[in-house]
Amino acid sequence: MAVPRYIQNFSRRHAILVSDDRRVGAALSPILTRLGLTMSQRETTETDGELAPIDLDPASDVLILDGDLPRMPPVPRLATNEQIPLAPVVGLVGVEAPSRLKTLMQFGATAFLSKPIHGGSVYSALYLAVNEHARKANMMDALEAHEQRRRLRRFVIKAVLKVMKERGCNDDAAFAYLRNQSMHARVSVETYCQFVVQRSAASDECGSDSGLKLRSAE
Amino acid sequence: MTKTSYPIGILFSTTGSYGTVGRTMLHGALMACREVNEDPGSGVILEPTIADPASQLVDYADKAKAMLDQGIRHVVGCYTSSSRKEVIPLFEKRDALLWYPTHYEGFESSANVVYTGTAPNHHMAPMIDHLVSNYGRRAFCVGSNYIWGWESNRVLREDLTQRGGQVLSERFLPVGDTDFSAIIEAIFETRPDFVFNALIGVSSYAFFRQFRAACEERGIDQKTRFPVASCNLSEPELHEIGAEAVDGHISSSVYFASIDTPTNRTFVETYNVSYPEGPAVSAEAESAYLAVRFLALGLKKAGTEEARAVLAATRGQSIDAPQGRVTIDPETMHSFLTPRIGRSRKDFQFDILVEAACPVRPDPYLVRAAPSLETVSRRPQLRVI
């Protein structure tokens, strides 16, 4: 299993501050510069205040979202997972009311920064936001992969039964055979079993080999 | 020229486990006060109030609070990072300034602190360059159990790992502990190329003595087989180690008393005449001296002791210091300093082995040096057998 690697240096990253309060930008800018980031500010009153996916570079941007905005702009989400924002989000907390904190979390904040901004807490907030965003994205990817495998388990059961019938073996031997074949084909056992079942169904329908071929993942 | 008087605080532990370093810092600060007060062009008279927290962490906040309660707006002080962290909230609450004159592990830039000591890029990177070039890439780390030891070891581990090296073991002891028998045995067992020492005060002195004695018992030349490198070893501490174990230790610093320039010769001579009883002049003494000199410049330019005004007036100021040109970085309020590597001698001085060509910009968050991702040290998963 891969060792998790935390991001600790934020130089060459860009912070996008979404706030209508110019004082917040004035306070944050020198602190972020010290940490190696550049910063730009977007105000929701501006005509182009809304954030589009094209505005965000997931590899380098960090969104700093002011929780005191009268109307929060939608934060673009990962194409692969609607629950995760495209870039890490730090929530700026002016009013520590549960409703404001909840809103910021719903907009994807994985760290909070209290107003007025204290220089000593910005690095910690960035560290938490960026690494927690990466951790959540990885977890969601892993969950999605597991979910996908779970959906394919029914093909495994069908394929095991098919092999047991064809080879007159028990379920363990059938599964071992399928696993071995999947490894030769360099695909997961679930994917291989899906192929076996679909090929069999196609053969039954056409009365002959449908021409389906399993190709190596490579 | 008329002069304005300002009260300032001087907060160093001149007694207790790291009292030797504290006394040299106090001397450096007082020497600067005297020079400022005697200089007709300085524009200010500094009236120091001195307090000694006796190396007890819990006493720092009380002493600092008492100073701020007296109306003092500027305090030169603290040696350990834990003591600095202890008092910073007070300075931020009262909007006063702490002038911090010690090498430290970085990852901080309080708006109420001016840092005249080294940032990690000043002392760690040159030391690792030197160690890897001359001794090898396998380190054994021993340190005092607080942020200085933890973070210094982390930076060393990351840098070494990137260079294909390895930290064989990390051991931490409470500040003031002096029994190193188990750690020394572990060093002999792991056989590192060098030992990295982030111990402070009496713990550090005891380690040097015990390690040298243990090596001699085994017929090992400690200086060449197990060299010890530190980022916090200065001349007064060599005296504390004692003549038997003083020589051959590597120190990464921005100042050594042996720097051969007219400015430094004058500085050392004045210090020795002023404080013949010791402790000897050190990097920490020079840094405390610089902190007071920069404070005086800031007060003069600002014309007030109000913290924001003095901070603004100090940004970008330069001094021709004993170590060379020192400038306050306007962005981080840390200092441009000149890294050097020294090796201790039997006469309690350092030979300077390496010296940067010019002052180096401070990088307290290592944004220009560290990789984006933390370096993960792990055993290879495949081995040729």
Image (cartoon, coloured by chain):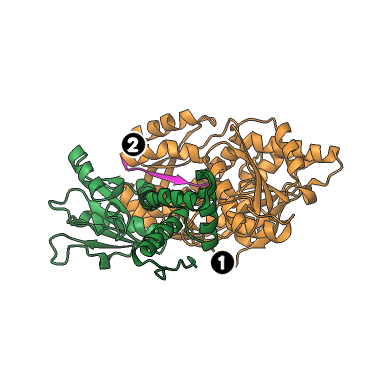
Chain colours: A green, B orange
**Left or right: where does residue B120 sit relative to residue B276?**
left
Query: Disc 2 marks which residue?
Result: B71
- Label 1 neighbour load within 10 Å: few <14, some 14-19, many 20+: few
Between A14 and B307, the residue placed more toward the observer is A14
Q: Amino acid at mark 2?
A: Gly
Tell me the chain of label 2: B
The foreground one among B278 and B172 is B172
Q: Residue at x 47, y 28 (%)?
A: B58
Can residue B332 be found in the magenta stretch? no
Name the residue tied to disc 1.
B358
Q: Residue furthest right?
A: B219
* Subunit of label 1: B
Q: Which image quarter: residue A76?
A: bottom left
Residue farthest toward the front in the current orientation of the protein: A207
Which badge, 2 or 1, is on the more N-terminal residue?
Answer: 2
Q: Is residue A46 above or below residue B380?
A: below
Q: Residue A129, how many percent across, how many down?
A: 35, 50
Magenta segment boundaries in residue numbering: B94-104
- The picture places residue B188, in percent across and down from the top left corner, at 77, 41
Mark 1: amino acid = Cys
The residue at the point 69 percent across, 37 percent down is B205
Q: Is residue B96 magenta?
A: yes
Residue density around tag 2, few if under 14, some if 14–19, many if 20 or more, within 10 Å: few
Q: Is residue B330 above or below residue A104?
A: below
- Please indicate, yes or no, whether residue B303 appears anywhere in the rendered image: no
Q: Which residue lies at the image location 56% right of the left edge and 66% below the top edge?
A: B358
Q: Tell me the mark number nearer the camera, choosing from 2 and 1.
A: 1
User: In the image, residue B213 lies at what x, y percent?
Assistant: 80, 37
- Mark 1 and mark 2 in contact (Cβ < 8 Å)? no
Give the image location of residue B133, x and y in percent.
Answer: 70, 61
Question: For the residues marked 2 and 1, what is the alpha-carbon distance in whole angstroms?
Answer: 39 Å
Q: Secondary structure at mark 1?
A: loop
